Image (cartoon, helix red, strand yellow):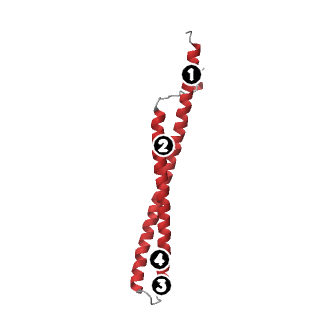
Amino acid sequence: MAASEREPLDIVVEGMEQIIQRDLDKHRSLLESANRDLLAFRTARSHEVKRKRHYRDQIGKGKFNDEALEAARIQMAINIRHLSDKADLAERKIEHHAEIVEALTKQLEDQMAGLKRLNDHRLAAEDASPN
């Protein structure tokens, strides 16, 4: 059998699954946190947009000081932009952690499959031993 026809070599480090699982749990937690942050930023942005519309509707009606309403609307526009930027950043964090979770999940599956093959190999070696 030529070297290029050989099966790829599996390297299994016993105990590595615990480290992978710890990292996986950490990144799942970070992913959930980023999802909560995104929801909070979107909710806050929506609230600011509604407030800004309400203030716009109040301008010129004589009930409130129009200059104060306009100054508040300017500040709300800044807040909306700030919350939009934070939402975009949270979306990028979600993508980042989702990729890491996916990769770690695959690594854990490969590790567990490797450990199973190692265990099967050990059992076969025990059965083949003359003892």
State which tag comes first along the sequence, 2 or 4. Answer: 2
Q: Is residue 73 above or below residue 36?
A: below
Which numbered disc covers residue 24?
2
Q: Spatial distance from mark 4 to mark 3, Cα to Cα?
A: 10 Å
Residue most toward the top? 130
Image x and y of residue 12, in percent? 50, 29
Of the 4 image quadrants, the one containing the C terminus is: top right
Amino acid type assigned to the residue bearing label 1 in the image: His
Amino acid type assigned to the residue bearing label 3 in the image: Gln
State which tag comes first along the sequence, 1 or 4. Answer: 4
Amino acid type assigned to the residue bearing label 2 in the image: Leu
The residue indicated by pointer 3 is 58
State which tag comes first along the sequence, 3 or 1. Answer: 3
The residue indicated by pointer 1 is 121
Q: Is residue 123 above or below residue 68?
A: above
Q: Is residue 48 above or below residue 4?
A: below
Q: Residue at x 40, y 86 (%)?
A: 65
Image x and y of residue 3, in percent? 56, 23
State which tag comes first along the sequence, 1 or 2. Answer: 2
The residue indicated by pointer 4 is 52
Q: Residue at x 42, y 81 (%)?
A: 70
Between 88 and 121, the one nearer to me in the picture: 121
Local secondary structure at mark 4 = helix
Mark 1 surroundings: few (<14), some (14-19) or many (≥20) residues within 10 A: few
Of the 4 image quadrants, the one containing the N terminus is: top right
Between 46 and 63, the one nearer to me in the picture: 63
